Image (tube, rainbow, N blue to C red):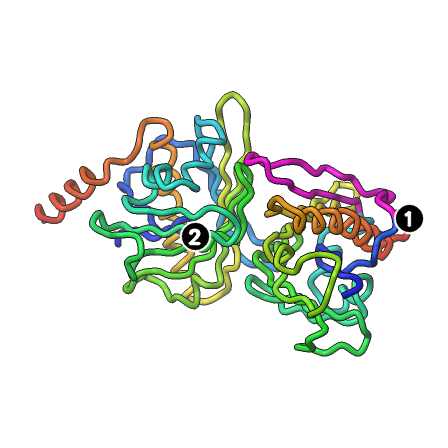
């Protein structure tokens, strides 16, 4: 499992921590737990950015070479790193969609990772939740905010946090480039 | 079971809506589906409002006479209208906590309703209840509850109508408990029994 970043997509192994256009508003919640929160402005309206996360065609344009999305509450986002992927392949990554509110909110949790050693603990990844919000800016663009909650304490969560901190920033950058390439 | 509400599926409160500041901000989402949404501004700090949803004592002050909350992502709100119910009873209402962000956001998904519920389990299963908490300052909190996942057809229409009234009552009960004091469940049950007996 060479690369499994993610918020949603699996992301490349990281080489640096700063990504142009990505704003880091991470904080500690009212109980003192870490909340990873990063955002970027995308040159497209919310409906189009939503489609980039929630349709096979849209997702495969920027996030993974093969993907299949079952829409709706309780649906799934399944994807592969190989272009010849197929549904149910044990090498795929699968997320369960917890909340589906079109063009506004998408919440999911990881349900399955391919077996094998990876950059973080699969159990820790399954314990967190990822919230994506799509806010219109009024300029025809969308502020996409990715928030990851549920981090506990200890080495497993520390490694996951560090990995997602960079990985999600990179993947937000990839998303923005998909819509304009300027950011 | 007088009332089944979306957020907790457990509120059994008087039908007298109080003077709580409640707004219906329901709308259709980008794909045209109904989103049932209510907003409440309550005179209580956000930490206290959060506790009203996420602690046993807090929940029993307005939502149901019997409740146990297991906090956290993947946690549970188990509750019953029955004063004699016990946690673990097979007919208790169970709502899975699918998202838990302290003092900010709570998302619930119903996992079990008692027999005789006035809607189909496969219909309620489609719904997620998103509850957002916003600190307005000055000891006031806005609570926004959104029911998402409604489809079309008679079954969804019936459930939507049920929750439209039930959730408003639930919000009224929440506001009263926070501003005036907790529900007296025994007194309420006695009043309900007397009312039935008088008919």
* Residue found at x 35% / y 60%: B113
Observer-nearest of B22 and A95: A95
Q: Residues within 10 Å of mark 2 (few under 14, many from 20)?
A: many
Q: Could you tell me which chain the residue with mark 1 belongs to?
A: A
**Is residue A25 in the magenta section?**
yes
Residue A182, labelled with which disc? 1
Residue B131, given in percent of the width and then of the height, sits at 50, 44
Observer-nearest of A11 and A161: A161
User: Residue A22 sits in which quadrant?
Assistant: top right
Distance from disc 1 to disc 2, alpha carbons, whole Å, reads: 45 Å
Secondary element under disc 2, as helix, strand or loop, is strand
For discs 1 and 2, the disc positioned in front in the rendered view: 2
Tell me if I can see residue B147 in this picture: no
Residue B97, labelled with which disc? none
In this rendering, is residue B125 above or below A177? below
**Is residue B62 in the magenta section?**
no
* Residue found at x 37% / y 37%: B58
Secondary element under disc 1, as helix, strand or loop, is loop
Q: Which residues are magenta?
A: A16-41
Q: Residues within 10 Å of mark 1 (few under 14, many from 20)?
A: few
Observer-nearest of A151 and B17: A151
Tell me if I can see residue B82 in this picture: yes
Residue B151, given in percent of the width and then of the height, sits at 51, 64
Label 1 and label 2 in one chain:
no
Residue A29, given in percent of the width and then of the height, sits at 59, 37
User: Residue B105 sits in which quadrant?
Assistant: top right
Residue B76, labelled with which disc? 2
In this rendering, is residue A86 above or below B65? below
* Residue found at x 81% / y 70%: A65
Image quarter hosting the N terminus of chain B:
bottom left
In this rendering, is residue B111 above or below A87? above
């Amino acid at each position: 499992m060479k690369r499994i970043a993610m918020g949603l997509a699996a992301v490349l192994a990281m080489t640096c921590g700063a990504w142009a256009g990505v704003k880091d508003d991470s904080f500690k919640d009212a109980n003192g737990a870490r909340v990873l929160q990063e955002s970027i402005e995308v040159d497209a309206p919310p409906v189009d950015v939503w489609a980039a996360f929630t349709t096979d065609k849209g997702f495969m344009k920027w996030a993974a070479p093969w993907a299949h999305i079952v829409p709706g509450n309780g649906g799934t986002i399944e994807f592969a790193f190989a272009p010849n992927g197929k549904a149910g392949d044990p090498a795929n990554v699968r997320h369960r969609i917890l909340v589906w509110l079109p063009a506004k909110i998408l919440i999911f949790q990881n349900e399955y990772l391919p077996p094998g050693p990876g950059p973080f603990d699969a159990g820790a990844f399954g314990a967190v939740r990822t919230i994506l919000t799509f806010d219109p800016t009024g300029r025809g663009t969308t502020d996409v905010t990715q928030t990851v909650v549920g981090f506990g304490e200890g080495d497993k969560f520390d490694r996951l946090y560090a990995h997602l901190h960079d990985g999600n920033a990179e993947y937000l950058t990839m998303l923005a480039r998909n819509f304009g390439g300027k950011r | 079971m007088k009332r089944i509400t979306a957020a907790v599926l457990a509120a059994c409160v008087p039908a007298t809506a109080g003077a709580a500041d409640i707004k219906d901000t329901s709308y259709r989402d980008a794909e045209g589906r109904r989103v049932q949404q209510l907003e409440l501004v309550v005179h209580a700090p956000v930490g206290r409002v959060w506790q009203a949803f996420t602690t046993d004592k807090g929940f029993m002050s307005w939502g149901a006479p019997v409740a146990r909350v297991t906090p956290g992502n993947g946690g549970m709100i188990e509750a019953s209208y029955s004063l004699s119910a016990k946690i673990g009873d097979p007919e208790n209402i169970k709502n899975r906590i699918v998202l838990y962000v302290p003092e900010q956001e709570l998302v619930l998904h119903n996992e079990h309703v008692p027999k005789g519920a006035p809607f189909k389990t496969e219909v309620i299963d489609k719904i997620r209840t998103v509850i957002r908490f916003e600190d307005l300052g000055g000891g006031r909190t806005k609570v926004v509850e959104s029911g998402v996942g409604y489809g079309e057809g008679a079954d969804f229409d019936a459930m939507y109508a049920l929750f439209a009234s039930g959730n408003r009552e639930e919000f009224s009960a929440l506001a009263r408990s926070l501003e005036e004091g907790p529900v007296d469940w025994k007194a309420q049950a006695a009043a309900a029994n007397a009312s039935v007996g008088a008919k």
